[in-house]
Image (cartoon, coloured by chain):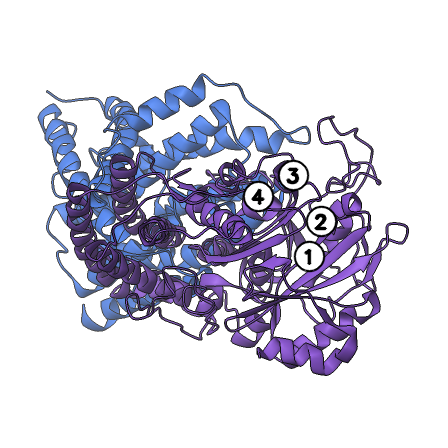
Chain colours: A blue, B purple
Amino acid sequence: MKLYPFVIEILQILVLLAIAPVFAGWVKMLKCWSQGRSSPGLFQPYRDIRKLFSKDVVLAENASWIFRFTPYLVFGVALLAGCIIPILSTDLPLAATADVIVLVSLFAIARFFTALAGMDIGTAFGGMGSSREMTIASLAEPAMLMAIFTMSLAGGTTSLSQMTQVILSGQSVFRPSMAFAFLAFLLVAIAETGRIPVDNPATHLELTMIHEAMILEYSGRYLALVEWAGMMKLFLFFTLGIAAFFPWGIAASGDLYAVFSAFFFMGLKLGIEAVFLVLIETGLAKMRLFRLTEFLGSAFLLATLGMLSYFILE
Amino acid sequence: MSILKKAIISSLGKAVQFIEAYQYPVSVHYCAVPREKFTDAAKAMKNEYALLAAEWATDETLFGRGYGIFACYRWGSEYLIVKIQIPADDPAFPSITNIFLPAYRFERQIESLMGVKPLNHPDLRPWIKFEDWPQDAYPLRKSFDASRPMPRVAGQYDWIKAEGEGVYEIPVGPVHAGIIEPGHFRFQAVGETIINLEERLGYVHKGIEKRFESMRWEDGFRLAGRVSGDTTVAHSIAYCMALESMTGCALTERAHWLRAIFLERERIANHLGDIGAICNDAAFAFMLYQMMRLKEMVLRTNLKLFGHRFIMDKVVPGGVVVDIDEKGKQEMLAELDYLAKDFDRLVDIYRENPSIEDRVRDTGVLKPEKARELCVVGIVARASGLNLDCRIYHPFPPYDQHDRIELDVPVPITGDVYARVKVRIGEVRESIRIIRLMLEDLPAGRLTSPVTLPSAECAGFSAVEGWRGEIIYWLQAGPKGEVNRCMVRDPSSVNWLGLEQAIHGNIVPDFPLCNKSFNQSYSGHDL
């Protein structure tokens, strides 16, 4: 049975909304186990989100529309990104409207507004978080773009679904440029999603926070949206990595069976990737803030090497 | 003759008057000097490289003689207390802050709570006393009625301000995220670099010193055990020792040894928690959970063997109230074997992880010369090369039996977070070792000895090495033999200043790590 492309689009969004919290729960679960603890369970993020939605919003008196608007924007951006990235199938109608550079800018818009919202209330922590976030962004975004350009060179396109299709069709497998780009992407993804050793998603220490410091003043449904969007971002970066580097299993057509098996492969790959993430997070302490430049600098360097090796070797 | 005694006599000559048969134990010298010679005495002590251990005031109205100001100096194993008498109609005394830095807060506190003004003190903002208390409310004075609620007035605290391009302030607290005590920290920072940190404490001021004065001698140990919950054993031992020295009560060997076992178990439990928490502040949560597991095991054994997880109220004047039998002994030895093995494995993980080492090395450095200037004590001092361990210097029983209990704790000189973790690791291992020693060699005897009440007009002193460091108690009996004053000096009273100094030049996100490596008590400081 053949599915309409728009049905697949809707399916993707549903998968994104529903699976992102489960994936976050899975990461948390693995983390607990690796630390020798029992875990709160796979569905704890759902319970957290439900709890936050049922709570009242506490809003600072001097909060402007930016502060109130940002959670919706961040959430919307995550949904939009979910329409572009081939999570289940490459046959996405909306993918034609936006390529991978737009994707990077989408995340940049969300980040820009989050940073503004962090400063909007005027607390010291918000401003501190925004300043740190922008420092990271200025280093992470070029590295991210370089890694993606390397992939586009190999695929001959900047459209994500076409890039995935090129790899799926076996035209470009295991090139040295891809290995470099993958490593660069890995480092950037850790920084972008705020994981250890760049940021600590589980900390309560206001002074060390980066992402959490910006959203410290959010509560109730706003916080629920921001948290949910955060989980989706983690999920999206993982699926983006899968689509760009290990797409095998992603459906190239709208065939129901292929989409179903794509879903299965996605789960499998995410499950395994989470193990690697948790190994990194458990084995490393957080870096000193100013080590970040070295960390993201090496990501940029790797991406550049990938691009050079494409021209020299391939 | 002791070095400090000799120094003060040679400097002040006839003006200094040593008073015998007032303060106990007799090994701690006690002298009176005229009011104007107070700074000279301090200078004489400074020239001998002595440290200021504590400075406090008493209201001696009941004796009919105004106020007393006391300064306690320490040099190696010696303590010397210098007293000046202040007339009631002119409550002021010469400040020694310019000579000894830790006097800075002691004297602000004396001014705030006793209303005796330190002359020439650089900063007379209140300390511990809040701006919304009435100006003339001096809680430690005898005329102050503690049973009535304090009226509130409008007031403001003047923070130190920093100005300039790019300088901004970060106010943190007093209520923090996480389960810790309240305290306000105000950072002045440029970018991420901290140029100044100002602490504001006193949010958990409970009037403990005042409360002691309305208690009976035999009940005070309970309150002492609650000065700082995590140091309950050491505080009760310190209170009891001061009282026992006043009354001439001699404990049985067994009581001393059991107290030492409690004290070392408290040290192990707290150090385990701290090592884990320090790693957690660098986002190395694995260590936190593993260390907490070990700590929990220690606490559960405490509950099982002694009836309380923190062994609270088990040290009483005259001895202890819980014993350990052969079965309990075996159980504790088995627990220690397991603990030692697991602890070593975890320490290996900590040592072999470069990412955590990168965070703790060269972070929050308190230089040895700074540590000496600030007269810090305990683990903080030891990490900066200054060994002031009361178990080794001025040892209290049973640690004075050097042939039976020998201590060897590391004294690194780097003064960074790494050093403070290293001292803790070394101390956990030493504590495990000496608990084993003591268990194998536990003397027989009664648990408690009868304690008489102190006679009128005498004082008792004690210094005990708790897990944070040297705890000092000074008790004074009034004209009718009642409690006239109980001075408590938790290690936090001096070490908080060390944190302010250690943070200079560090970056804002490293503060939690530095703070946790000090881990001072708010409650013990605020009293």
Residue B460 horizontal/vertical position (percent): 58, 54
Residue in front for this viewpoint, B162 or B137: B137
Question: How packed is label 4: few (under 14 Cα within 10 Å), some, or many (20 or more)?
Answer: many
User: Mark 3 or mark 1, which is nearer the start of the sequence?
Assistant: 1
Quarter of the picture containing the C terminus of chain A is bottom left
Query: Label for residue B105?
Result: 1
Q: Examine the rendered structure and indicate whether residue B109 appears above or below residue B3.
A: above
In this rendering, do the residues under marks 1 and 2 share a single chain?
yes
**Which residue position is annotated with label 2?**
B127
**Which chain letter matches label 2?**
B
Residue B462 horizontal/vertical position (percent): 53, 56
Q: Amino acid at mark 4?
A: Gly
Say if mark 1 contacts mark 2, CB within 8 Å: yes
Q: Amino acid at mark 2?
A: Trp
Q: Amino acid at mark 3?
A: Glu
User: Mark 2 or mark 1, which is nearer the start of the sequence?
Assistant: 1
Q: Examine the rendered structure and indicate whether residue A200 appears above or below residue B152.
A: below
Secondary structure type for disc 1: helix
Quadrant in the picture for residue A53: top left
Distance between the Cα atoms at labels 1 and 4? 33 Å
Q: Nearer the viewer, mark 4 or mark 2?
A: 2
